[in-house]
Amino acid sequence: MAITVAINLALINPSTLFHPKSPNPSKLRAFTLRCSSAASTAVTDLAEIPWKTSDARLVLEDGSIWRAKSFGASGTQVGEIVFNTSLTGYQEILTDPSYAGQFVLMTNPHIGNTGVNFDDQESRQCFLAGLVVRSLSISTSNWRCGETLGDCLAERNIMGIYDVDTRAITRRLRQDGSLIGVLSTDRTKTDEELLEMSRSWDIVEWEFNSSKRGGEAFRVIAYDFGIKHNILKRLASYGCKITVVPSTWPTSETLKMKPDGVLFSNGPGDPSAVPYAVETVKEIIGKVPAFGICMGHQLLGLALGGKTFKMKFGHHGGNHPVRNLRSGHVEISAQNHNYAVDSSSLPEGVEVTHVNLNDGSCAGLAYPAQNIMSIQYHPEASPGTHDSDYAFREFIQLVKVKVNS
Ligand SMILES: NC(=O)CC[C@H](N)C(=O)O
């Protein structure tokens, strides 16, 4: 039932595309760590570093080259770099399928000290393309720790780098917008080759294959575009019996199953690149109460006739202020998205219910006439604050009213 996400990394011919922003490759700028030599030497003097170190490069499409140490897997990997401002929760971030194809840079400088446990996974594997951290904890200490962060990444073939100026990269992303990059530990590849790889890759290349009457549970069908486990756990805690179906599940089958509600999940990539999913949403809305989370919210926006667009550097973190326009309350929310619904493109009758206070973008929608609600961020908040958990209660309320009507 789970999706598989296939991405064309190895098949790209670096010579086929040339990015219009290309500076002369001979003018590649090399950024060496200002503090790496001093800080790392100091640490090495005190304790033997327990992981294998090797040189790694992060080459961004703007021509900047960031030299770092590697941990986890080695090799060469292309991805889109995004920064996440959460202070902790790196394990949930690693296993959030919406990060597929992306390098996540943690702005919190010290990562890895609690290791990885077997209870906090948001899905069955690590989906992100790579992890970028300033300082990797040299020791791991937590009563639930099952393995170190480095071992976890190495076993799952995910690359990580540390000893890199994450603040400088974040400032660059905030200024210039999101960037494609290549992480590599391969010394045989030149900087120019890596730069070409970063410029010929596109993240949109995804393929998705993959208490009611008498105390009975509500039956909810969850369309899996890359669903996080905590969404299922939160729905279950509200008394739902959930059936997870693949993103390509036929609408006719869904309707035959007579669900009380349908959830459209979070997921990676550009919502406008999956028109079949928009069609599915169109066929379901109006017939069954629907709740969209993140990608699901964007698909609902498109299905209702609105438009989505790519943001400059997206929202990734556990500390985004959102105003609920109905209650006037401000929630601190967990967010992870690069695309957004354009509020001005929405037809009459569709209400913008939430606004991101950092940039005024649309953070929630409702179409009461058709029992639809959606949230651009993560009410299941894992990691994050739990201010927005009430969204599940509101969805259950929509379901209840419909069931009892
Ligand atoms: N978390 C999500 O569902 C992300 C939605 C979409 N992939 C975006 O980046 O905007």
Image (cartoon, rainbow, N blue to C red):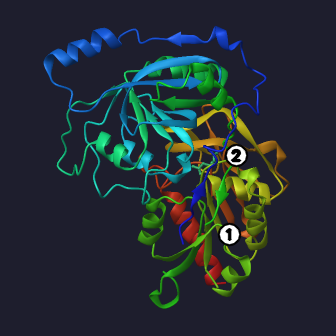
For the residue with label 1, is its CB less than 8 Å from the closest atom of ligand 1? no
Residue 249, compared with residue 265, is above or below; it is below
Give the percent coordinates (x, y) of residue 391: 54, 59
**Is residue 120 left or right of 404 when viewed as pictured?**
left
Hey, what amino acid is under mark 2? Answer: Val
Q: How many marks?
A: 2
| Residue occupying the point 60% across, 23% down | 174
Q: Does residue 375 sit above or below 148 in this rendering?
A: below
At which x and y percent is residue 255? 69, 82
Q: Secondary structure at mark 2?
A: loop
- Determine which residue is flagged by label 1: 248
- Read off the residue under disc 2: 204
Quick check: 396 left or right of 281? left
Q: Position of residue 131 (x, y in %)?
A: 44, 36
- Residue in the image at 71% along x and 57% along y: 299
Q: How far across and how far down the image is residue 150, in percent?
A: 31, 39
Q: Nearer the viewer, residue 272 or 199?
A: 199
